[in-house]
DNA sequence: CATGCGCCCATGTGATCACAAATGGCCGGC
DNA sequence: GCCGGCCATTTGTGATCACATGGGCGCATG
């Protein structure tokens, strides 16, 4: 039996939460491919915990759609159907356009500069063909903007959609042979600067659905 | 009418799933008030299971926002702030308008008749001052319509919002001294019959946000 | 060589136990 | 009479165990 040492005040998070967060980050940022299987004992072994916290973390991720349970209880990252991907993209558009719109009146210059700097990180990742890094920075760009919307429930929903799309996104951006930062991010920044709400809505919608388009053809 | 919660494809469900479904239904339909506390051992005792399945069910409900964990891990139904309620109402509007819009081209006469019949059940519940029955039938009305949208992910998100609003809804409709079925449901049905999409969007939006209005004043 | 069958082990599920922390009430002091 | 600290009990967390089941792999057979 493990000795439940008290690691003082720095690590207040429970074990299952640490497992949950790590797995969630992996899935959301495309570090695991679609249909990848995992076992509770395997997770427990990796994190040095028993099956109990592993199970709780997995349950939570299943509830968020980040993982799938087969009929026999086996867990794996979901392999999304074409319709499901389109639906999730539509959800992204719906939610993120609204979030951007709500963030617009609160977007002062410091935010715009921060977005600009994240955008150059994205360009860097793109040139290095670093898919995971690209996805991570791309999501950071969006999250940074949406945080200004002061709408935590809505942002949480958007992140849930990102999570579900995570494993698919790597495959998606893998076949995306681009060498420059996404053009629509520049449009988003421009619309923010100009206070142009219709333009912002269009730019966000385009940015969010662009990936889909090159998957369906 | 019984609870048409799920397609009922699986009857031999695991214990934690039975606990989960029961608690979820209770919370969504306003059978538990806001801020109500529960214990894992208590849940286990009620359902005749150990703490393990109770914990899994609770974790899942926490992930969906149906339950809240205090800093010490105590679980309770959330007591939503005013801003949170408004945000969730905005989410309902956003998602459900889209769902209704997608359902419109697929809404044939049988669906409309079914909605009409559910609506008379609602009227009955209203007259009996049966808050839980009212909420249940009201959600059934919406779910019946949205099922036609063929957008399971979007519907799941809408249900998650209903779940989060559940405990608040009873308090809400408790102070709603109405004696007739909601007028906007009739507008929704009329718009469906006429194939009037803008009218439908407006009617759904109005129906969904009406409850909020009488809470904020 | 291909195919089908059966067995073994890996895997998920749920119960129970040990432990630490928080909670709530009780008692004593002021 | 009121307040504060102390202790018993309740509660969540995580480990371990017993059990049923499904999957995969090897072996036998046509």
Image (cartoon, coloured by chain):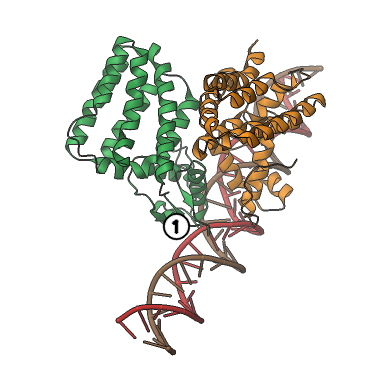
Chain colours: A green, B orange, C red, D brown
Vertical arrangement, residue B163 with respect to residue A189, above or below? below
x%, y% of residue B161?
Answer: 57, 30
In the image: residue B159, left or right of residue A135: right
Vertical arrangement, residue A70 with respect to residue A8, above or below? below
Q: Residue at x 44, y 57 (%)?
A: A39
| Snapshot quadrant of residue A163 | top left
x%, y% of residue A25?
Answer: 38, 40
- Residue B1 visible somewhere in the drawing: yes
x%, y% of residue A206?
Answer: 32, 26
| Snapshot quadrant of residue B32 | top right
In the image: residue A9, left or right of residue D4: left
Q: Residue at x 62, y 21 (%)?
A: B207
**Quick one: A204 or C22, which is closer to the camera?**
A204
- Residue B71 visible somewhere in the drawing: no
**Quick one: C17 or A190, which is closer to the camera?**
A190
**Quick one: B214 or A32, which is closer to the camera?**
B214
* Parent chain of label 1: A
**Quick one: A150 or B90, which is closer to the camera?**
B90
Q: Secondary structure at mark 1?
A: loop
In the image: residue A122, left or right of residue B4: left
- Identify residue for label 1: A39
Q: Residue at x 54, y 35 (%)?
A: B106
């Amino acid at each position: 039996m493990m000795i439940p040492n008290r690691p003082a005040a720095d690590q207040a998070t429970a074990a299952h939460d640490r497992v949950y967060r790590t797995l969630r980050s992996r899935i959301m940022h495309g570090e695991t491919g679609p249909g990848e299987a995992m076992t509770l004992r395997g997770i427990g072994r990796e994190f040095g915990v028993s099956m109990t916290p592993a199970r709780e973390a997995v349950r939570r991720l299943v509830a968020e759609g980040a993982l799938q349970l087969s009929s026999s209880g086996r867990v794996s990252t979901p392999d999304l159907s074409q319709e499901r991907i389109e639906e999730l993209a539509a959800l992204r558009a719906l939610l993120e356009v609204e979030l951007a719109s709500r963030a617009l009146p609160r977007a002062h210059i410091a935010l715009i500069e921060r977005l600009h700097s994240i955008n150059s990180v994205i360009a860097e990742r793109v040139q290095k063909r670093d898919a995971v890094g690209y996805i991570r920075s791309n999501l950071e760009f969006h999250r940074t903007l949406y945080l200004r919307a002061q709408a935590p429930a809505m942002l949480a929903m958007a992140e849930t959609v990102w999570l579900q799309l995570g494993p698919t996104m790597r495959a998606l951006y893998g076949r995306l042979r681009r060498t420059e930062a996404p053009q629509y991010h520049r449009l988003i920044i421009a619309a923010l600067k100009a206070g142009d709400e219709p333009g912002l809505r269009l730019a966000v919608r385009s940015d969010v659905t662009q990936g889909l388009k090159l998957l369906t053809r």
